[in-house]
Amino acid sequence: MQKHKKIRKDISGTQDRPRLAVFKSSQHIYAQIIDDTQNKTLVDASDLKIKNGKKSDKASMVGEELAKKAVKRNLKKVVFDRGGFRYHGRIMALAEAARKGGLEF
């Protein structure tokens, strides 16, 4: 929680460059693209409906799904908010899949 507050002090999403926020629990991973100026979630994705596969594979699928939805809504550039989690494992898998899907950060 403290790390997340420290990071959010510097990172903010705008209309031109919304924030891609990631949250992971012990079982699931969630991602949202948020416009902080309007306090609106523009696009979201999670692994709740994905039944089979390893956690890192599910995270990659979430990143791909999020990127597809974002590109449909004409969102290409985002600011990555890892939510205080280390950039490795599931967080890294999600980020790389989102980059492959067409997001820039």
Image: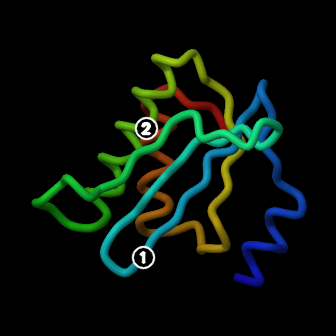
**Element under label 2?**
helix
Q: Name the quadrant of the N terminus.
A: bottom right
Which amino acid type is marked by label 1?
Ser
Other-residue count near label 2 (Cα within 10 Å), few / some / many at <14 / 14–19 / ≥20: many
* Along the viewing direction, whichever of 34 and 39 lies nearer the viewer: 39
Q: Position of residue 65 (x, y in %)?
A: 35, 37
Q: Residue at x 44, y 58 (%)?
A: 30
The amino acid beneath tag 2 is Leu
Instruction: Provide the residue designation for mark 1.
Output: 25
Which quadrant would the C terminus be assigned to in this image?
A: top right
* Identity of the residue furthest to the left in this view: 52
Describe residue 6's horizontal placement relative to residue 24 as left or right.
right
Decide: few, some or many residues near mark 1? Use Cα within 10 Å; few <14, some 14-19, many ≥20: few
Name the image quarter holding residue 68: top left
In the image, residue 83 sits, relative to residue 2, either above or below, namely above
> Pointer 2: what residue?
66
Q: Position of residue 3 (x, y in %)?
A: 75, 79
The colour style of the image is rainbow
What residue sits 67% from the left and 73% below the top?
A: 84
